Image (cartoon, grey):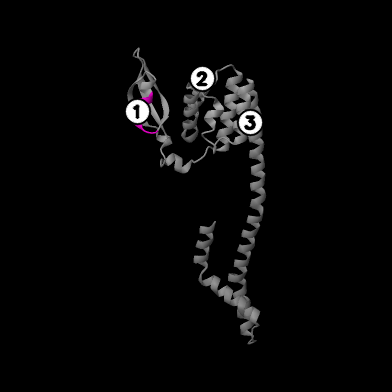
Amino acid sequence: MALYEYKALTKTGIVKSGTLDAASDSAARAELVAKGLYPVSIKLHTTSTLFSFGNLFQATVSQKDLIFFTKQLAVLLRSGVPLLQALELLIDQFTGKLKSILITLKDNIKEGKSLADGMEQYPLTFSRIYMQLVRAGEASGKLEFILDKLVQYLERQTQIQSKVQGALMMPIIQLVVMFVAIIFLMVAVVPKITDMVSDLGKELPTATLAIMAISNFLIEYHIALLVGVLLLA
């Protein structure tokens, strides 16, 4: 299925535009005719194309955008704005993946589907908990209250993720510092010490010879090693 943008005429001559999901443009045209509309133009919605640049770099909606959407939808519903109109107002506030999703949700609601049913098409954006709570909110008539709770849940989840990422970064930083220190010792300090020992005419221990070999290797191939580390990072 793909998302198509259309312009069509009603029986009274009014121009109507929107989007719909269909297997092809001919299927989209047939669906419009079945609804009593005369198709004027039908084209593939750019943000829903499988290999579009938007989808390559934005496979999922960011947590920040999801929180903002949930918060704004709750505010509009609490103000007495109907769900369909609220989604129409929010569509213009977003771009890319989320905008495409909101357009589809709006069209689904026009067709009589629930908000939760529409969200089930996007499991990468709306988690199972999110969809279940929205469904409960729609059933109880307290969707705005549920959305407020979802905002709190998402914000708390974001804080936990930030703390976990921060905790994971510290060992990585320590390893990098230790690696740099070892490289410095091998490249700058060890050669000077071995030169001093060699000048004394003493035979070097096996362990020292091994360290010297490592030092020479690092000096000779330091550029290749640096490139390798950067590629792994």
The residue tagged 2 is: 85
Q: Residue furthest top?
A: 12
Between 32 and 155, the residue placed more toward the observer is 32
Q: Secondary structure at mark 2?
A: helix
Q: Are marks 2 and 3 in contact (CB under 8 Å)?
A: no
Q: CA distance from mark 3 to mark 1?
A: 37 Å
At which x and y percent is residue 223? Answer: 50, 65
Residue annotated with mark 3: 151
Quadrant into which the N terminus falls: top left
Amino acid carrying label 3: it is Val
Q: Is residue 28 left or right of residue 188?
A: left
At 60% across and 28% down in the image, what residue appears? 134
Which quarter of the image is occupied by the C terminus?
bottom right
Residue segment shown in magenta: 23-31
Closer to the chain start, of discs 3 and 1, is: 1
Mark 3 vs mark 1, foreground winner is 1
The residue shown at (64%, 82%) is 206
Mark 2 or mark 3: whose residue is earlier in sequence: 2
Classify mark 2: residues with Cα within 10 Å, few (<14), some (14-19) or many (20+). Answer: few
Q: Earlier in the sequence, mark 2 or mark 1?
A: 1
Q: Nearer the viewer, residue 168 or 61?
A: 61
> Which amino acid type is shown beneath numbered disc 1?
Ile
- The mark closer to the camera, 2 or 1, is 1
